[in-house]
Structures are given as C-alpha cells and as structure tokens.
C-alpha cells in the first residue's frame, strides 16, 4: 500500500514564524502536491512538483514556497506565517503518466497560526 | 478559469436510504474524473478514476457514472450505512494530464443517521 506521511497532525505556530510542513511518500512517485482545505471550499492546490528540484505554482502560492531535494520528500514552507494561513494542509503523490492514476493523500496537518 | 461544482453541499439521510450526488465539470478537453471519499480524521481515499464517456464503475454499494459530453458525473450509494458518512470529493483532470494536476470540487458531505 502507498504510504504518504505528513510530519505532524496538529501544529500551532505564531504569526511571523517560518513554518515547515514535511511530506514523505514511499512509492517512488514522481508527482507530489500540497493542498489546503478550508470550510466550504474544495482542496486548493498550493504548489506541485513533478520531479526532484522541479516545482510549479498552483492556484494559491502566495506566502508559500516548497522544496524537493529528494524524490520521496516534498516540503511546504510558510515564509512568515500569518493568521490567514490557519488551515488543514494535505500532501499527495501520484505517478505522472497513465489516465487511471489516482492521487494518494497523507492524513493532513491542521495548522493554527496565533 | 476551470470550475468543478458539486451538489448538494451536504446531505443527511437515514440508514438504508439510497442517495446520489452530482459533479459538474468542463466538457471540453476532458482527460479524467476522480472521486474520493474523505472520512473524518483520515486521509482522502480514491474511489474511482473514470476516463471514458459512458463509464460506469462500482465498488460494493457505491457506483458512479460519467458523461463527458455534457460534463457531469453521478455518485450513487445504495442502502446508506453510518460508515458511509464522509465528504465525497470529485476532481477533474484536463488536457494531456501529464502533470497529474487535479481541480477539485468543494465536496458533498454525507451524514447517515442510524
């Protein structure tokens, strides 16, 4: 079974802090994604990566950056956390090719910025 | 802007009721349509990946249909059980799909009362 592991289930940080959310997958997937989920909204894509050291902005990249130094690890960075970044963050991974490839998700990190 | 709409936003049914929800997506440049189930405190889990117009997929009491020409998919649950309570997400993949990027609807939250 594919395992996508996010480093924390719950995290509380202060405004202005630099925050790191880590995600590791064990299935050698090329694609990795970071989403956030807010009430009443669908999953919104922040950043994605289709290879090591490659990244592309999603729909809401402002205030975030990412790092992919190794294939299995994709980190989301909040450069200077703000209260509007309080949210549920989900990491996912998938193979890039083939029409039938689903995304595999981690359990999510509920991040509160005080 | 590509938009994916799900209806209804939430649904409360009694155990044993059958139910269905709708996902609407752009009918042009279709590549694939995904359905995920997201139970509280768990990670979203892929139910179906559908690629062909007229596709019907089934997994136990849950089934889905796809109409790519008119841009909609239905998810059906027959004889709902309390363990079916979850948020059901659909996601649309367009174009060549090489990046694996999905556009999610806002979800339908189902509550099944015993």
Image: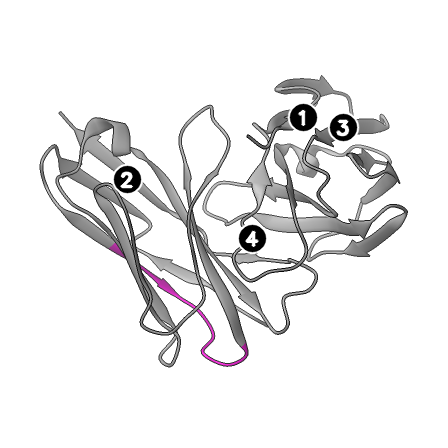
Q: What's the mark number on residue A101?
A: 4
Where is residue B36 shown, x and y percent of the image? 43, 45
Q: Quadrant of the N terminus of chain A?
A: top right
**Which sits earlier in the primary sequence, circle 3 or circle 4?**
3
The residue pinned by badge 3 equals A22
Task: Describe the element under mark 1 as helix, strand or loop.
Answer: strand
Give the distance between the C-alpha atoms of the residues marked 2 and 3, in whole angstroms: 31 Å
**Which sits earlier in the primary sequence, circle 1 or circle 3?**
1
Residues marked 4 and 2, same chain: no
The residue pinned by badge 2 equals B110
Give the distance between the C-alpha atoms of the residues marked 2 and 1, in whole angstroms: 26 Å
Badge 2: few (under 14), some or many (20 or more) residues near its Cα, within 10 Å?
A: many
Give the distance between the C-alpha atoms of the residues marked 3 and 4, in whole angstroms: 23 Å
Q: What's the mark number on residue A6?
A: 1
Report whether B95 appears left or right of B48. right
Residue range (magenta):
B21-29
């Amino acid at each position: 079974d594919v395992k996508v592991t996010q480093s924390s289930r719950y995290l509380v940080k202060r405004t202005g802090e630099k925050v790191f959310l880590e995600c590791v997958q064990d299935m050698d997937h090329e694609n990795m994604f970071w989403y956030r989920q807010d009430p009443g909204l669908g999953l919104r894509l922040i950043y994605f990566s289709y290879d090591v050291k490659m990244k592309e902005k999603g729909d809401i990249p402002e205030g975030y950056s990412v790092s992919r130094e190794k294939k299995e690890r994709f980190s989301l960075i909040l450069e200077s956390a703000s209260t509007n970044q309080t949210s549920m963050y989900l990491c996912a991974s998938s193979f890039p090719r083939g029409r039938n490839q689903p995304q595999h998700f981690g359990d999510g990190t509920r991040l509160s910025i005080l | 802007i590509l938009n994916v709409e799900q209806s209804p936003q939430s649904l409360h049914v009694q155990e044993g009721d059958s139910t269905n929800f709708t996902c609407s997506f752009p009918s042009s440049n279709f590549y694939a349509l995904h359905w995920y189930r997201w139970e509280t405190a768990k990670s979203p889990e892929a139910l179906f990946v559908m690629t062909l117009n007229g596709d019907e997929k089934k997994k136990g009491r849950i089934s889905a249909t796809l109409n790519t020409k008119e841009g909609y998919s239905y998810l059906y649950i027959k004889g709902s059980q309390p363990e079916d309570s979850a948020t059901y997400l659909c996601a649309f993949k367009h174009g060549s799909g090489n990046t694996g990027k999905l556009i999610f609807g806002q979800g339908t939250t189902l509550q099944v009362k015993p």
